[in-house]
Image (cartoon, rainbow, N blue to C red):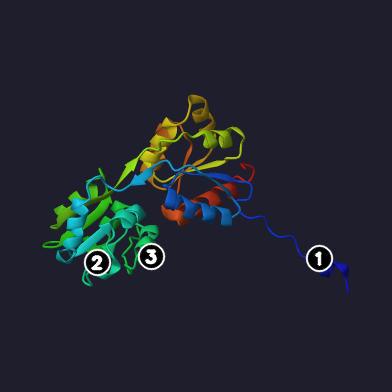
């Protein structure tokens, strides 16, 4: 037997091998995203740039749960809205249509027993939701939007303009991290971090506020993969070289893979 037939062909390197990726999502979502980065050979560096907490007052949320049957449409703006705002599955009215801006939020809903959430295809955001034919004509419809405290009014106002009665229900709040970023700064300084991922303009601001001007300058050398045009624009305003990607885990990962195929030496 030829000796070469006993030798395995060399395996292709994992597509993100040698790439340290800074993950700035809140803790729970960061862990899931980090596992997907690791599966592609990357080395996640987790620093949650936003801490998610329950609202100080849960009265509005409790009331919304009691009144669920009076609504026609329920929109959860994020996986955090699902985690902190979704009712028990056996309390979910059969007629109530659930909407999610992206697959991650829909998966979170399915995980708590609320299956079949409708997701936009145009874009994974409020603008994408508003392009869905199911939300085009809403005269006489009641809509509840589960979101964080102080969220954008754009979606609710747009649905009202289409004839809906809209209630906003704050079910979580976002705060800046209280702990320092020493570990992150060390990873950047030692060149163990090669890419930054951004899923929130607020998280970006929190990240930069936690860094010294020297660390900010070092961070600005890394490609910043942003999951939405608004986030990419904010990143550029703050001096970071933003690479715009589609939202959600799949969009962010696809953007990174495409970029590193085009820049194989940048790792």
Secondary element at tag 2: strand
Quarter in which the N terminus is drawn: bottom right
**Mark positioned earlier in the residue sequence (2 or 3):** 2
**Mark positioned earlier in the residue sequence (1 or 3):** 1
Q: Which numbered disc, 1 or 3, marks the residue closer to the eye?
A: 3
Q: Relative to residue 182, is residue 266 depicted above or below?
A: below
x and y, in percent, of residue 166 in the image: 16, 55
Q: Relative to residue 142, is residue 181 depicted above or below?
A: above
Q: Which numbered disc, 2 or 3, marks the residue closer to the eye?
A: 3
Q: Relative to residue 239, is residue 192 depicted above or below?
A: below
**Which of the labelled discs sits on residue 97, or is there none?**
2
Secondary element at tag 1: loop
State the residue at coordinates (62%, 34%): 190
Between 210 and 243, the one lying in front of the other is: 210
Secondary element at tag 3: helix
**Mark positioned earlier in the residue sequence (2 or 1):** 1
State the residue at coordinates (38%, 65%): 111
User: In 3D space, how far apart are the residues under numbered discs 2 and 1 (Cα atoms)?
Assistant: 56 Å
Name, please, the residue furthest toward the bottom: 1
Residue bearing the label numbered 1 = 7
Residue bearing the label numbered 3 = 111
x and y, in percent, of residue 199 in the image: 41, 46
Q: Is residue 137 visible?
A: no
């Amino acid at each position: 037997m030829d000796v070469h037939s006993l030798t395995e062909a060399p395996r292709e390197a994992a597509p993100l091998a040698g790439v340290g990726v800074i993950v700035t999502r809140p803790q729970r979502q960061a862990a899931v995203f980090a596992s997907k980065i690791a599966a592609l050979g990357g080395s996640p560096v987790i620093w949650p740039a936003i801490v998610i907490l329950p609202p100080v007052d849960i009265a509005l949320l409790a009331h919304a749960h009691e009144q669920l049957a009076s609504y026609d449409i329920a929109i959860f703006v994020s996986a955090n809205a699902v985690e902190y705002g979704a009712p028990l599955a056996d309390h979910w009215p059969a007629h109530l249509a659930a909407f999610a801006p992206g697959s991650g939020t829909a998966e979170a809903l399915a995980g708590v027993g609320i299956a079949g959430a409708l997701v936009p295809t145009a874009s994974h955001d409020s603008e994408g939701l508003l392009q869905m034919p199911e939300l085009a004509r809403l005269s006489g419809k009641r809509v509840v939007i589960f979101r964080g405290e102080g969220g954008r009014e754009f979606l609710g106002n747009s649905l009202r303009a289409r004839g809906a009665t809209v209630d906003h229900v704050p079910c979580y709040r976002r705060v800046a991290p209280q702990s320092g970023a020493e570990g992150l700064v060390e990873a950047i300084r030692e060149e163990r971090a090669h890419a930054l991922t951004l899923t929130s303009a607020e998280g970006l601001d929190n990240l930069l506020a936690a860094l010294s001007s020297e660390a900010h300058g070092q961070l600005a050398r890394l490609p910043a993969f942003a999951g939405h045009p608004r986030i990419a624009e904010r990143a550029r305003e703050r001096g970071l070289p933003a690479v715009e990607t589609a939202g959600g885990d799949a969009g962010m990962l696809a953007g990174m893979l495409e970029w590193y195929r085009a820049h194989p030496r940048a790792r």
